[in-house]
Structure formats: structure tokens, C-alpha cells
Amino acid sequence: MAYRWCYRDGSHGDGGPVKQEATGPGMMLALVLWLGVAAPEASSSADAVARGDAHYARRDQGAAGARADPRRVEQAILEYRRALRLEPGSIGARYRLLRAFFFRATFCGAGHEEQRRLFDEAKRVSEEGVARLLHDVGPVTAAARLGALREVPDATRLFFWAAASWGEWAQRHSRLSAASQGAAARVRDLAQTVIDLDPELEEGGGYRILGRLHDLSPRLPLLTGWVSRQAALENLRRANALAPDNSVNQLFLAEAILRHEPKHREEAQALLRRLASAVPSAAYAVEDAYFGERARETLAGLR
């Protein structure tokens, strides 16, 4: 499933900072993580990915509701980084690293500057991966390119997490910075590729990202004049139709309705009430708890 722009991760739609409690052990572990010396080197990229997956699967251990202990996901990041060092062309390691960055930045109490740093790296890692992948596919027609990409394992997931990384990066930087780098158009094109390759990936993830883009992006003359609030609602409704139990689909659609279609306020409230009362799933305990909290906060603000 998928988070803020993407799967069951997510951060505040306005890109605002999340308070972080700095602790000695956490800071030390983060330092060890960035130095890359927390664990013995894996013997192969596949070994490192497997170790990263084991840590990531336990990312909710020690969580307090919607806030996770960062240690597990930091270990996952460390292993995925190692996997890419050992095999720079590993698409599986690359998209997993982007996913782990998202979880660390969103659900572990990271402050605004740490979020920026994580998504700066995520954008760079994603662009390197997409460029490498398209180079391998070669200069072919758009239709042939899609056919070739469908044959590459994990290619669609890389495009999905690249779109999410660009979207999150843009939310942490000024409108001028985002516009100067063409962030909105980049997210749009990456998300559309996901839809073209596999519209059901991450429970409507391509539609969710594209809808969120049209929902939140400012309309700037000559830059993002193509942004459409109607397109936001259409794409978010498509995502929700594919996976109506997905907590992110419910929240994003409800928020877009409240912003752009107030005559359907009751529909938005129904979505929020359902999400607010849902029991978090075992697979996405922290993520679902987070979005449930968001729903309850939004409902409270509507009274």
C-alpha cells in the first residue's frame, strides 16, 4: 500500500514540520547510520536487501501509536544503501531505500530539517535510478518504452517511489525552488507512467499521487497552468474506488472534497468518520494509526 503522495506513509499536506524529541541513543544511531558502520558488510546486494527487508518488516516495533521508533527503519536504510553500493543497478534495492526514507521522515518524529535532508537524498537516488533504467531501455517510442518497462522487475515501483520522493521533496522546499526544478511536471509524468504501467499498483498509487498533485499544487502561469482541481477529484476517486479500505485513499479524497467540492461535505465527513473509527491493520499499524489521527483532527476542525 502507499503513503502521503504514495502509500500508507504520509505527512502533513501543508508540508509543515513535525516536532521531534531528540534523544541521545537516537542521535548516536543516526550518526552511525550515516557513517555506514552499524553492522558488518553484507556479502552481496541480495544479502543486504534481505537484511534490510527483515528490519523494515519490524518497523512498528516499539511504536507509540502513530509514531515509530526510528531504529528499525534506520537499520533498513543502512542495508539498502549497502545493497546499492554493491549493485548500483539494483532497482529493488533502490525503491526499497526510497520507501524507507519516506517512513523515516514521516512516522518517526523527524524534524523539518531532517525531513529535508532525507528527501534531498531520496530525490537524488530516485533520479539516478530512473535515468539508469531509461538508458537501459534505450531510445524507443513511448509505446515501446512502456512495453519494455513492463518486462523489468520492480520498474513500476521505482517510478512510483520516484514520484513520491519528488512530491515530498517539493513540499519541503519553497515554491520557487520546486518550480525552478520542474517538480510538479516531474511528479505528473512519473505518476502517469505508473498509471500506464499498472494502475492497481499500491492500491491505486499512481492515481493517488496524481490526484494529490492536482489537489495541492499552486497554479502558476507558464509553469503549472495545467493543474486542475477537477483532475484532483477524479484521480483520487479512482484510487479510492480501487481500494476503498486504504486509509490514505480515504483521507486524501476527503481533504480534496473539503477544499474543492464543498457541496459534497457530507461525503467527506463520512469518509473521515470511517477512517477515524477503523482499527489499524497489522501490516500498516503505524501508518494507519497516523492517518486515523489525521482524520480525527480534521473532523474536530469541522465542528
Image (tube, rainbow, N blue to C red):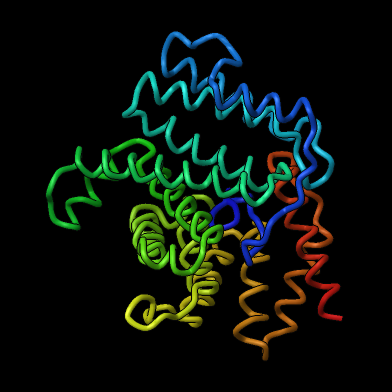
Question: What residue is rendered at 43% in x and 44% in y?
Answer: 157
* 290 versus 221 height, above or below: above
Question: What residue is rendered at 50% in x and 10% in y?
Answer: 41
Question: What residue is rendered at 65% in x and 52% in y?
Answer: 112
Q: Where does the image place residue 216, in percent across and percent down from the top left?
A: 54, 72
Q: Where does the image place residue 17, in percent across and percent down from the top left?
A: 69, 56
Q: Where does the image place residue 234, in percent across and percent down from the top left?
A: 50, 76
Q: Where does the image place residue 217, in percent across and percent down from the top left?
A: 49, 73
Q: Does residue 228 appear to the left or right of 297 in the view shown?
A: left
* 157 or 239: nearer the viewer: 157
Question: What residue is rendered at 47% in x and 43% in y?
Answer: 122
Q: Residue furthest bottom?
A: 263
For the C terminus, give its image quadrant: bottom right
Q: Does residue 206 appear to the left or right of 268 in the view shown?
A: left
* 264 versus 195 height, above or below: below
* 45 or 244: nearer the viewer: 45
| Quarter of the view holding residue 5 | bottom right
Q: Does residue 177 appear to the left or right of 37 in the view shown?
A: left
Q: Does residue 110 appear to the left or right of 213 in the view shown?
A: right
| Number of numbered callouts drawn | 0
